[in-house]
């Protein structure tokens, strides 16, 4: 419910980052620990968030035979 009040009770112990959800704070902590729990199954790429891995996966799936004319 903190979303509606603007309250951000979860604060990082290592920097000034604050958020309204514990899971966001947990993800933020990867920036300090260097932990990259999301690994590409097709190469050595690792990252801190599922959305980043999803974006990365396009390098393996996009049709490289189509070239942009621009």
Image (tube, grey):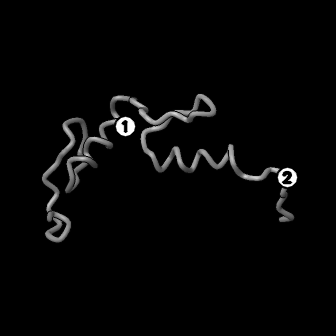
How many marks the image carries: the answer is: 2
In the picture, the quarter occupied by the C terminus is: bottom right
Q: At 20% across and 56% down in the image, what residue appears?
A: 20
Q: At 64% across and 49% down in the image, what residue appears?
A: 58
Is 8 located above or below residue 52 in the figure? below
Query: Considering the numbered disc 1 on the image, is that residue within a helix, a strand or a loop?
Result: helix
Is 70 located above or below residue 50 in the figure? below
Q: Position of residue 5 (x, y in %)?
A: 14, 69
Residues at badges 1 and 2 in contact (C-beta under 8 Å)? no
Residue 43, by quadrant, is top right
Closest to the observer, 67 or 12? 67
Q: Position of residue 35 (x, y in %)?
A: 39, 30
Query: Considering the numbered disc 2 on the image, is that residue within a helix, a strand or a loop?
Result: loop
**Marks 1, 2: nearer the viewer:** 2
Q: Which mark is residue 57?
A: none
Q: Is residue 15 left or right of residue 59?
A: left
Disc 1 crowd, CA 10 A, few/some/many (<14, 14-19, 20+): few
In the picture, the quarter occupied by the N terminus is: bottom left
Q: At 84% across and 57% down in the image, what residue appears?
A: 66
Q: Residue furthest bottom?
A: 4
Pointer 1: what residue?
A: 31
Q: Earlier in the sequence, mark 1 or mark 2?
A: 1
Pointer 2: what residue?
A: 65
Is 51 located above or below residue 37 in the figure? below
Q: Position of residue 23 (x, y in %)?
A: 25, 47
Q: Position of residue 36 (x, y in %)?
A: 43, 32
């Amino acid at each position: 419910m903190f979303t509606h009040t603007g309250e951000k009770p979860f604060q990082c112990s290592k920097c000034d980052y604050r958020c309204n959800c514990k899971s966001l704070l947990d993800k933020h902590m990867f920036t300090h620990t260097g932990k990259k729990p999301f690994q590409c199954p097709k190469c050595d790429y690792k990252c801190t968030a599922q959305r980043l891995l999803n974006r990365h996966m396009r390098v393996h799936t996009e049709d490289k035979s189509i070239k942009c004319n621009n």
